[in-house]
Amino acid sequence: MAIFVLTVVGLILAASAVDAEKVYNFHMCPNTQCSVRDLYIDPCPEAAYNLPCEWSENASTSIAFTYNPEFRANLPKTQLYAETFLMDLPFLNVNTDACLYTNCPVVKNTDQHWLFNLFVPYNYGRMNYRVKFMMWDNIYHQQCCFKFDINIV
C-alpha cells in the first residue's frame, strides 16, 4: 500500500512540475537534518536565469520538491516564512499540518515528495522576500529547512 501511495504522490508531483521551472538557487539552513533536491516552482520562468521567482499578487503558485529527512515524524508540522531583519514572518494562509503536503508518517532516510499550493493575496506587499521553508517534528525538535528568494509583483 505504501508503494502505491508513494507512486501516486510521485505522479502528482511530476504532473504539477510539467509547467514549473527547476530552481537551483536555494540554500539549506544551518543545522538542518535533511537534503532537498529537484525543487520546482510554478510559475518561475526566472529560474532559467538563476533569478528569484516572481510571484503575482492575488495568484496561486506551487512548490514541489523531493526531500530525504534524517529523522522520522508521525505528525510533522510545517510553515513558510518571510525572513526579515527582526524576525521570521509566517505566510498567513499555510496550514501547518505537513501531512497535507507529503506522505505521513515521515520516514527517516527515505526520499519523499512535497507539494505546496499557495495563494499569494494582495496583503503580502510587493517586495523582495527570502522565503524559508520549514518542516519539523514536535517531539524530538528535528527539522528540514531551506531558503529561496522571491519577488512579489
Image (tube, grey):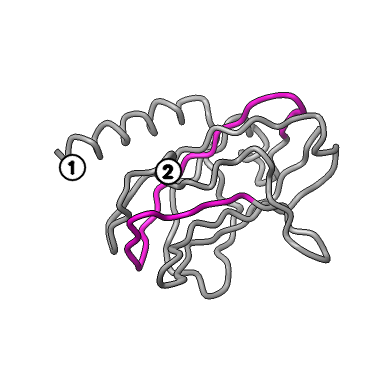
Q: Amino acid at mark 2?
A: Trp
Determine whether, in the image, residue 145 is placed left or right of residue 33: right
Residue lying at 56% horizontally and 59% vertically, measured from the top left: 146
Residue 127 image point, x, y percent: 84, 43
- Which disc, if any, is residue 114? 2
Q: Amino acid at mark 1?
A: Ala
Quick one: label 1 or label 2, which is nearer the N terminus?
1
Part of the protein shown in magenta: 55-80
The residues bearing labels 1 and 2 have C-alpha atoms spaced at a distance of 16 Å
Magenta segment: does it hold 52?
no
Residue 5 location, quadrant:
top left
Q: Secondary structure at mark 2?
A: strand
Q: Nearer the viewer, mark 1 or mark 2?
A: 1
Residue 149 image point, x, y percent: 70, 50
Magenta segment: does it hold 60?
yes
Q: Nearer the viewer, residue 63 or 99?
A: 99
Is the C-beta separation of discs 1 and 2 under 8 Å?
A: no
Determine whether, in the image, residue 121 is placed left or right of residue 47: right
The residue wearing badge 1 is 2
Residue 123 image point, x, y percent: 82, 34
Query: Looking at the picture, does residue 41 appear above or below residue 28?
Result: above
Magenta-highlighted stretch: main secondary structure? strand
* The N terminus, quarter of image: top left
Q: Secondary structure at mark 1?
A: helix
Residue 134 image point, x, y percent: 55, 57
Residue 124 location, quadrant:
top right
Query: Looking at the picture, does residue 70 appear above or below residue 43?
Result: below
- Which disc, if any, is residue 115? none
